[in-house]
Image (cartoon, helix red, strand yellow):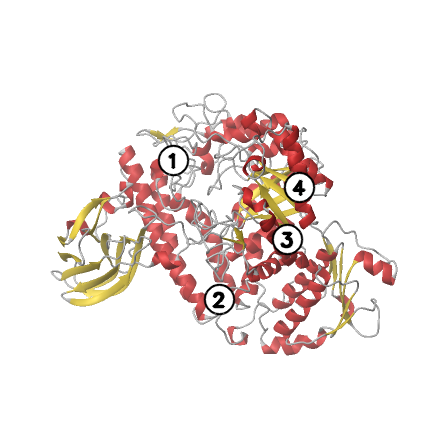
Amino acid sequence: MRPLFWLATALIPAVMAEDGLDGWLRYAPLPDKIAKCYAKSIPSQVTVLGATDGLPLASAVKELKLGLKGILGKEVDISDEGCMGGETPSILLSTLENYVSVCGDLDDPPELDEDGFYFNTKDGNVVILGSNERATLYGTFEYLSRLAQARFEPVEYVDNPEANIRWGNHWDNMDYTTSTHGSIERGYAGVSIFFKDNKIRDDLSRVEQYARLLSSIRINAIVINNVNANPITLTDENLAGVGRIADLFRPYGVQVALSLNFASPVELGDLDTFDPLDEDVVRWWDGMVDKIYGVVPDLAGFLNKANSEGQPGPLTYNRTLAEGANLMARPAARHGGIFMFRAFVYDHHLDHRDWYNDRANAAVDFFKHHDGEFEDNVVVQIKYGPIDFQVREPPSTLFANLRHTPVAVELQVTQEYLGQQNHLFYLTPLWRDILDFDLRVDGEESYVRDVVSGKRFGHKLGGYAAVINVGMDRNWLGSHLAMSNLYAYGRIAWDSSSDSVDVVEDWTRLTFGLDRGVIDTVAEMSMLSWPMYENYTGNLGVQTLTDILHTHYGPNPASQDNNGWGQWTRANRYSIGMDRTVWNGTGYAGQYPAEVAERFEHIETTPDNLLLWFHHVPYTHVLKSGKTVIQHFYDAHYDGAEAAQTLVPMWESLKGRFDDERYEHMLHRLVYQAGHAIVWRDAVNYFYHNLSGIEDEAGRVGSHPWRIEVEDMELDGYERVAVTPPSTASRFYAVEAAANATVATATATLGFPAGTYRLAVNYYDLPDGQASYEVFINGEEVAAWEGDYDLYLGNTKSEFLDGHSAARRWLGEVTIAEGDELKIVGRPDGIERAPLDYVVFLPEGVVD
């Protein structure tokens, strides 16, 4: 039972500007009527047993005082003496061990696993007993979360984690300039909170706040540097800085871990080899690991990416992956550390002409025959799908093929291929889809969630790792709504059965308040986001049709094929899809246990949403829905783009229900997404329409009666230019100002019937320039804008006219008559030469 969620908007307190820095730990005041009703029932006495400054119990007291003051306006007294059962109701915080030591055995002691806690709010007291100090802190955050959501009903329960590895991975680089992806690889919210100019930041004030957020969702360790690790992280100066970072995480029970570069003995030391069987190399790593633990004695362990995408590793010396992992795992084990070894090992120079080559096979090919050869503290970290964080993949077959080695599933909070935080994408349903998959090992229930937790094969270690990549933006991930994914990751890693809707509703209450309308709307938008994005980017299991050779952001279906990266669709004029069958294809389907393999081996038993992942079929193949593959593509992309248009009015319905700052910030992104979804729709549909030569039964693809192509207008100072890929421009061409032009114009006579229309312009928004534009009807200015999306959208930027820079500006309503003159004036700035694609006049109810 969750009372009080029926509250009318009138009970919501006055809104104040917020920037997102507090995330879901706002501790915002409850409405006065609720606070006055329930504040008296909350004990004013807090007893904490065994707290030490700088450790989690002390942080629990700090959070409790802060939270009760913020949520209920309640001050509390703190004592370090007392047990349950006293005359005065109290809030008691302790580890179970401390409590038994001070107060004696419990009549019915709770069974607590590592990091688990006992929680009891019955009988007027609040009792939080943890298996360790951070578990007690977890229980304290749980209590404050309940209060912030107006959940005052008495409860008693034990909450144990499903898995003991609940890590975050940062892909932060030591410097700002040398990485191809900036300070944070696949980061879209500013620069690193940890590093600057090849050193640890002097100002680490953001780290403590981040530690609070992670602890509140029960993340117990964080890898602070990129898997493409820079050896200089291990210099004396930088290790001292790592120690400073660990000191800030420690009070919140979050341990620090480090990514290691396999070639460090050569790059950082004075050796001429990094052969894992060389005695000098073994001694070097032994000494280095001891040195690291000398600085950070409670280091969680290490992460390594070896022999993939140019990274060094044991295969360089014809040594096995197990020999490489064990080299660094053995000294880590002496200190109680875990060694996370990524299964992301593959050849990115595959011969695409070979029908039987398949990057998806790599994980099993590289790791299966080493099962059981790894040290006990080695955990193989496996991406959830066999390729690379796509919008839909089947679970990696490696989960079913490592029975004697603990594993962890690697997820992404950062939306690398999934809209890069400019597109709303609530990830929990996707994660649940993977975790709830039954691999049927030996014909028995073998859910991925039970494999990664260690339950299925009886491992003590196992769990979760997620690429998070927060940045210095005040709202951490660039988008306020994207923070639901970080919150949800913690919930899923603790309890994989967490319901997707419940999670996002809890997050919304904590982030935006108790207004039922806000909760319902954000949940509806969030649950719509995955199927919507899948529809307009890539469906039927074909992968996300983004540009894999450049930014991983905008549409470019052609980039998938005819290269060595192995994210192929095998699209040609007649057919599409990877044949991963055993009888005729790459054999990937056969890497699954027999029951699953048999299902995916045959088209008839393969679900349509994975058809093109496992089978190569004609565009005219009829799906179980009764549609052909190509018609499904056309329809799905139109459906997805149309769904994206609904996000804006849904969000606009929330105006005034919370602060304007966050409302306006998200409105800008959702309006952008509505436009970019149309860019996606057209680019993908144009590409496959041109490739297959098959018409859209509905006659939509290539037919846009409400558009005016700017290259067909009368141009002065503008010149027609080709766009690459061509499908990312309407009719494949755009215009941009001549190199020496200071002003360029495009003019046309309107042929639309008289009426009121919604005006929009598709153009290209490049970095390092903010061109300005004006739109005139019969000489009267009706709209103006600047090409400034690059200033506040966090996606990886492109300097070219393409699907990454393509954007739509919605310019409001205009009233026109047939024969009116349309004129657009563009003023270049920097490399942005005021590029334009088309103008659209939309009648009411038309999506274009």
Can you identify the residue that label 1 sits on? Answer: 560
Measure how far apart labels 4 and 1 are at the Cα level. Answer: 41 Å
**Vertical order, 657 against 612 (above or below):** below
The answer to which quarter of the image holds residue 260 is top right
Q: Is residue 389 left or right of residue 137?
A: left
Return the residue nearer the eye: 604 or 136. 136
Can you identify the residue that label 4 sits on? Answer: 289
Name which of mark 1 and mark 2 comes first in the sequence.
Answer: 2
Q: Residue at x 19, y 59 (%)?
A: 824
Of marks 1 and 2, the one in the foreground: 2
**Marker disc for residue 19:** 2
Q: Amino acid at mark 4?
A: Val
| Element type at mark 4 | helix
Q: Amino acid at mark 1?
A: Gln
| Element type at mark 1 | helix
Q: Residues within 10 Å of mark 2 (few under 14, many from 20)?
A: some
Measure how far apart labels 2 and 3 are at the Cα level. Answer: 30 Å
Residue 436 screen position, x and y as percent: 59, 42
Give yes or no for contact between labels 4 and 1 (Cβ–Cβ under 8 Å): no
Measure how far apart labels 3 and 4 are at the Cα level. Answer: 14 Å
Measure how far apart labels 4 and 2 are at the Cα level. Answer: 40 Å
